[in-house]
Image (cartoon, rainbow, N blue to C red):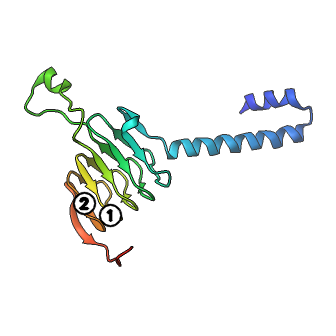
Amino acid sequence: MADIEALLKQVTDDPKVRELMAQLVRELVAEALAEQTLETMLVFGDRDRLDIHPTAKVNNAVLNLSSGTITVGEYSFFGHGVSVLTGSHDVEKFGAERQDAIPEEGHDVTIGKGVWVASNATIVGPCRIGDHAVVGVASLVMDDVEPYQIVAGSPARVIKTIDHEDGE
């Protein structure tokens, strides 16, 4: 922050103005860093295969688009450390051949609207998570989840269906 003070000294000689400006700069930088940290995604693969609705909140997630698309519906949100993986390798191959044998499609992940994916969950495609479902903390989802279901565990299992009226 000493650099800020030096820069502001070039702008004004008034120490009170400099202090107010320095405080404002510190607050703006802190806010920008908080936003960047909150919604920073690590994306592997072609970003054109990623469709996140503008109302969705995807925190610091890992998104692998190597073997399919990822779609995140409106008002869905992720906790921290979520991984959504379309990437896969051919278990019938070995060594370098297995390492390089990555299918280009067929492992899509679709996350419906209003879905809550809790922290440290891993979703492996191909799978579809239905509208308003909940994926519990540290769960491993490898199959479809029906709308309004709460799943948890590794592998994830249905633990409850959320009561709801038709039309939400």
Q: Height in image: 158 above or below 108?
A: below
Task: Name the spot of residue 3 as percent of width and height, x first.
Answer: 74, 28
The reply, left or right, for residue 33 in relation to residue 150 is: right
Helix, strand or loop under label 2: loop
- Res 163 → quadrant: bottom left
How many numbered marks does the figure carry?
2
Left or right: residue 75 compared with residue 125: right
Are the residues flagged by discs 1 and 2 in contact, CB closer than 8 Å?
yes
Of the two numbered discs 1 and 2 on the same chain, state the one appearing first in sequence: 1
The x and y percentages for residue 24 are 76, 43
Outermost residue on the right side: it is: 14
Q: Residue at x 24, y 53 (%)?
A: 141
| Amino acid on which the number 1 mark rests in the picture | Ala
Residue visible at 44% across and 49% down in the picture: 58
Cα gap from disc 1 to disc 2, whole angstroms = 7 Å
Residue annotated with mark 2: 145
Q: Is 64 positioned to the left or the right of 33 in the image?
A: left
Q: Is residue 149 above or below residue 100?
A: below
The quadrant of the picture occupied by the N terminus is top right
Which residue is at the front of the view, 47 or 124?
A: 47
Query: What's the residue at 36%, 33% (across, down)?
Result: 44
On the image, numbered disc 1 is attached to which residue? 133
Q: Residues within 10 Å of mark 1 (few under 14, many from 20)?
A: many
In the picture as drawn, the residue positioned furthest to the top comes out as: 96
Three-letter code, disc 2: Val
Secondary-structure class at tag 1: loop
- When the figure is inspected, residue 73 is found, relative to residue 39, above or below; the finding is below
Say which mark, if any, is on residue 46. none
